Image (tube, coloured by chain):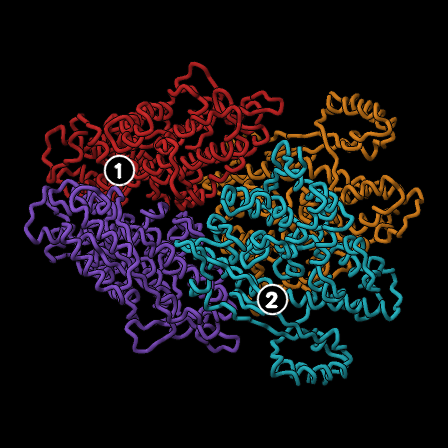
Chain colours: A orange, B cyan, C purple, D red
Amino acid sequence: MDYATKKLAEEKVFKDPVHRYIHVRDQVIWDLIGTREFQRLRRIKQLGTTYLVFHGAEHSRFSHSLGVYEIVRRMVDDIFIDMPEWDESERLVVLCAALLHDLGHGPFSHSFEHVFDLDHEEFTRAIILGDTEVNHVLTRVSPEFPQKVSDVIAKTYENKQVVSMISSQIDADRMDYLQRDAYFTGVSYGHFDMERILRVMRPKEEQVVIKSSGMHAVEDYIMSRYQMYWQVYFHPVSRSAEVILTKILHRAKDLSQGNYQFKQDPTHFMAFFQNNIELEDYIALDENILLTYFQMWMQESDPILSDLSRRFINRKLFKYIEFDPANEYEKLSDLKELFYQAGIDPKYYLVHDSISDLPYDFYRPGEEEERVPIQLLMPNGKTRELSRCSEIVEAISGKRRSDHKLYFPEEVLLQDGTQKTLKKQILKVLRG
Amino acid sequence: MDYATKKLAEEKVFKDPVHRYIHVRDQVIWDLIGTREFQRLRRIKQLGTTYLVFHGAEHSRFSHSLGVYEIVRRMVDDIFIDMPEWDESERLVVLCAALLHDLGHGPFSHSFEHVFDLDHEEFTRAIILGDTEVNHVLTRVSPEFPQKVSDVIAKTYENKQVVSMISSQIDADRMDYLQRDAYFTGVSYGHFDMERILRVMRPKEEQVVIKSSGMHAVEDYIMSRYQMYWQVYFHPVSRSAEVILTKILHRAKDLSQGNYQFKQDPTHFMAFFQNNIELEDYIALDENILLTYFQMWMQESDPILSDLSRRFINRKLFKYIEFDPANEYEKLSDLKELFYQAGIDPKYYLVHDSISDLPYDFYRPGEEEERVPIQLLMPNGKTRELSRCSEIVEAISGKRRSDHKLYFPEEVLLQDGTQKTLKKQILKVLRG
Amino acid sequence: MDYATKKLAEEKVFKDPVHRYIHVRDQVIWDLIGTREFQRLRRIKQLGTTYLVFHGAEHSRFSHSLGVYEIVRRMVDDIFIDMPEWDESERLVVLCAALLHDLGHGPFSHSFEHVFDLDHEEFTRAIILGDTEVNHVLTRVSPEFPQKVSDVIAKTYENKQVVSMISSQIDADRMDYLQRDAYFTGVSYGHFDMERILRVMRPKEEQVVIKSSGMHAVEDYIMSRYQMYWQVYFHPVSRSAEVILTKILHRAKDLSQGNYQFKQDPTHFMAFFQNNIELEDYIALDENILLTYFQMWMQESDPILSDLSRRFINRKLFKYIEFDPANEYEKLSDLKELFYQAGIDPKYYLVHDSISDLPYDFYRPGEEEERVPIQLLMPNGKTRELSRCSEIVEAISGKRRSDHKLYFPEEVLLQDGTQKTLKKQILKVLRG
Amino acid sequence: MDYATKKLAEEKVFKDPVHRYIHVRDQVIWDLIGTREFQRLRRIKQLGTTYLVFHGAEHSRFSHSLGVYEIVRRMVDDIFIDMPEWDESERLVVLCAALLHDLGHGPFSHSFEHVFDLDHEEFTRAIILGDTEVNHVLTRVSPEFPQKVSDVIAKTYENKQVVSMISSQIDADRMDYLQRDAYFTGVSYGHFDMERILRVMRPKEEQVVIKSSGMHAVEDYIMSRYQMYWQVYFHPVSRSAEVILTKILHRAKDLSQGNYQFKQDPTHFMAFFQNNIELEDYIALDENILLTYFQMWMQESDPILSDLSRRFINRKLFKYIEFDPANEYEKLSDLKELFYQAGIDPKYYLVHDSISDLPYDFYRPGEEEERVPIQLLMPNGKTRELSRCSEIVEAISGKRRSDHKLYFPEEVLLQDGTQKTLKKQILKVLRG
């Protein structure tokens, strides 16, 4: 039988707390799950440093990837099947793209990419197209199949309907992570009626649209997303941990480039410090290894590297104050000066961190990040953009919300000993 | 104010998916949670290798420890308070013991202890009584306080009622892990009405007893426990991963003792290989470090160490068959012989693994492991042992159930190439 | 198009708290739901008097009937479809039988049948086969179709596999009511993994069997059933309400047959009092009507009828003591005598109520109520009876458990006034 | 002991699916629950006709009333206790007001009040202050206690803080019904983190305010409310049932006032038809009685009364179209004319139904219905109105949303037979 259509003798199931069961019937999917590159996702947490605030958030990208696959599987096998506007020949490519869409994430992805100027999406493509177990499985389907899967994930695939299933303002990726992250953190946000949304999804030319009778379920989903961003993903304490993590990596890189002699060679990092990264170096990394290094670096003689590492491992995080970059620029440079004088390097110990989110937007041609809006399918067969139908969505549509904070080691400033006056002055400035 | 009774200015809460919120009011508890030894529990999974079968089971002993604390907190602050048989002066010691009861667990505890002949309970005591941050916090309460906490955990504390709250056949430890492990794995077992059980718990002389009106909730709890053991904790595939993990550690130890030259020094393991373990060596270890070594060992020249490490990291597990040690002893020695002949070392590649569980037992004096039975408090004020009241519990009471399996690398035996005939013969014997 | 296979233009869904959604695609099913006989089930509570103890249990047989239909629909459309041992031509008959299996239940079914010597199963058949809207829908499928549906419900249908789907020790009926009743009462029993059980169900010659890999889910289901019986269905306080209800109906019947002049003619009851019941009389009854009469009867001059009615409506229930019919027969007749002397008619005010349940049984040929045991399908393709595989099920298999109580109006006996000494004596006997 | 502070020997609990358990410790509360007026609430559905769309919504006002009591109990006993701005002497009055706040609701309250020009709030006060069992219990606390309870419910109580606990834009009443109605209907809206909201509630002079750290939980609550209104409470099909119900009552009243001879005297309704209502007449009514009459009226000779009654009982509802009263006034009068000509009385068969909701509003002095806005308690101790802090709430604040529909018996218009042309014309006008 053809490998692309080969079914397992008996369906395999994974017990999943979010979707109850994840069902695998296709040999290709089963083989992909068994590859080392996919198994590696077990060693990368879904929410990075969030577990230091929400202790339940210890789940990995492995379970999320299975979840996205399962949602797409339900779309194609339970909902779209037999619908005239759905092209059944796209089934396998979208299932594979769903499963593999996060394959290139590195350890503590966001910070890591930032420090070493990397892009996880590039690595996702590199793993799919390079000499990997994943690539070998995909190539068995057909020689051009890896490129197709990669294109779907990169959003360059010709069939935009297929792209929209995993990358749009209401896609399988978001629907899984909102529910999954809510489940593992235990927050009560993140609930919405996914079963209803799936049932009203309709494949339409360039994208999957939503029957207007499901509008309220979509509103609920948009609100869930909004709440999850501000309550969980942007939690100021997990940002503190991320700030420290970023600074550890910066410091180690700076030291290495300054020819500092590490007690134990940072073998796994050398390619990154030297900016000479092979795919294999990247795949070999994971969060266990980072944390193992951080533990070793607690013993390093460089006081900044050892202090920051200790802070991360033992969770001695920075405190923060609100910061208004538009009006407090001077305050920041004053503070930097004072930190220098007090012997506390502001490059590592006074960090301006900013985040922002746009909860939903309609199409604004020419914008940097063009977003495909959610389209409702009206009873008359025409589509209408969501924010034109929903008051609630209209209200938040296109409104970017940002937050700025300054992070710093408060307990150092409170310590008695050297520089007491200077520290008091710093605290006074910080507390406004 | 006295440190033992010092309250936080504002109650702190942790969001917890099992108990909704975990409430901390006591300064002592807050300080204990902040110690490096307690934070280390974030790096030890609650269920060891189970996540390789139930992908949701990535939660750590940190969250379980908070959970046990919270259950005991509810007992003492919501239920026992003002009851005449409850000694309020035991409040803090039992809260601390609940929080710290798993402090000495090592990475993949069960296998690790087995290979290096260690006992995590000893390490729990060592951390509480040694020169650690935890000890410093406890000592601030009073000089003898660490010893008291340690005694409760060791079950040698004089007040057996207090001991029974965290170590008995229905204790806060079990009530937390059953629910927590069910939640994270997503299985539907593990549900029972804990709120009801807490409400009918009554402190009585030597133990906490249960009002007879709550008997059915207790039955449900016993059944949950039974199902969790056989469906989750003893899952044959996670036992396969544990078998491999044990054999990796064995092989590394054997190699080290045989003066094998590792490519990278196994620094973190040296104390363990040389059986010369300081407390600090033990605390420094965690699962990140073990998994980092396993990844490095995939590159070792020793074929057994590298093969087993690769199996664990990439989840290429052993298959298994049922085994009856009473009647198939000869079969096992035949198989060992055949494995030798085929060049597959049976010491590492043919593993007899057995587990057993006793779901509930009444008191059997003189038994190796004397169990305190669950006592029901009857309306007349007398107590009666659970299995004398409950038909269901009586039915399973004292019935030990065991399971034996042989684990082996099936795909090696199915490979073409050398020793084809011998491998076929082995498979024939294995498949009976 | 053929009526039997006619599909709705668009699938209809009912929001259901237990199964999330109930899906209707078949025109026949849709038409049956719309009949007056099926809508009548909204006016009959699923759990009779239980709502007087578990206030959430106000749900009707209507929702249960939809639930049983939905479970069977999943069996046939999601699981059995394409399985060689499943006869697709049975699909519609089993769906209709599932939906209609409780159609003949009267108001407070159990008590009502008891007093008027009726059998709801007979009325189910009568409604299906008589001149009713339900019958007209079924007849449109084919003239013999009503009889087939009736036979499945009566368990006389030739294809026993089909019968077992709604009437066996693990059928859609039980799986729905256990979950539904647990949901509405709010008890934590009643959870089991139905999705798993459905997935391992296999049609086999004479019955649906369960793949042995699902044994633990079945054990859990059996335990749920056990707990629901003893914790909910047999709750002593709801039995008290049922005792009173039975006695109201008895009294009204006795009065009517004794030519008592009711203030308001008991029109709806006349056929029942005179034992001359037409199908239409039966269908016209529901719980609203019964409760309306009870309210009217509170104003009747007969003191017993008005007292009992008031007790039911205002929930002034009887108290109870345990009773051992084997050894306390004499006590009961003594009590009756004392009640007579005290002027409290023991026929209505001293009620011996007994219940019993057999949680599971294997096949015992010749027994009054032959039960089809649950068969597990072993990997070798043979079946094995459940209790031979499961220790837990074996332990409770065939063990009938009974409970006897005496119900009486305690507050009357505690009242001062007439017969004070006699009442004291009665209380003394009652309290043993 | 004083009756006001008398505690039950042992706490009583009710199993509740929404709050797990409802706890009763006070003798007064226990006695109130046992009164006939409170037990009557079991016979009034919480959501009127909604069960005809969401079949799970069969729950009564009894369970909701217990739920509101339980929420207030948690506020006062778990949160406010020991807070300086909370006046402990208000505890009992607010608990009683919470329990009794819906006491005066009649059967299918909204329609019933509309037809007979009644106000359930007036009846609540009448029951509390009249010669009732409830009044007798309350009077035992103190002679002026009934008036105090009544004042809290009527919002005229002097202590506005107490009033706001059960009547404000975030009160125990709403928090219970949103969750409860979501639970019983099974919709996924209605979830919010009540435990969090309770924990951040702070008694403040004139009202209970919310600590600003809980703002997001409040946003979630406001959104839940919004969704429940539009998805559940205003569901167009349950409005259809309500339209019919209203018209049944209208018709019966009109007939009675026109001296129509009912086959069976409408005893229970006479006081209402004659607009001469005693408290006892009102209390004697419930939904069982209404539905019993509707069944009897199916047999009446008046074709409109019998048709409408049959429609309600057998759920043959009206269909609907959208209607724009501002621009389609003429269309409506044309339709009325056509209905007359076709012999279908538009008074009963062409119904304009409108609903509207204001999801949240800040204080607008002088408005007809002055609303107390939700105040957030900022870290600096000042309060700030919610919509000034929350973008989402601001977006919907003060925006009243309305909906208008025309209801009519579509199947009559589709019937062949008389007036075929006229009916066709009507359908054409209706369908625009």
Residue C244 vs residue A248, the one in the foreground: C244
Q: Residues within 10 Å of mark 1 (few under 14, many from 20)?
A: some
Q: Which residue is mark 2?
A: B369
Q: CA separation, marks 1 and 2?
A: 57 Å
Q: Residue furthest top?
A: D366
Q: Is residue A206 visible?
A: no
Where B329 sits versus D318, above or below? below
Q: Chain of mark 2?
A: B
Question: Could you tell me residue C174's position as x and y percent?
Answer: 37, 60
Q: Position of residue D12 (x, y in %)?
A: 39, 43
| Image quadrant in which the C terminus of chain D is located | top left
Q: Quadrant of the N terminus of chain D?
A: top left
Kind of residue at disc 1: Arg
Q: Amino acid at mark 2?
A: Glu
How many C-alpha atoms fall within 10 Å of the one at disc 2: few (<14), some, or many (≥20)?
few
Q: Residue at x 67, y 48 (%)?
A: A46
Nearer mark to the viewer, of 1 and 2: 2
Q: Do the residues at discs 1 and 2 belong to one chain?
A: no
- Residue A392 lies, with reference to residue D181, above or below; the image says above
Disc 1 designates what residue?
D36
Q: Which residue is situated farthest in the left direction here?
A: C259
Give how far across and how far down residue C391 sits, in percent: 48, 71
Image side of residue A367 versus residue D311, left or right: right
Image-quadrant location for residue D28: top left
Q: Is residue C404 visible?
A: yes
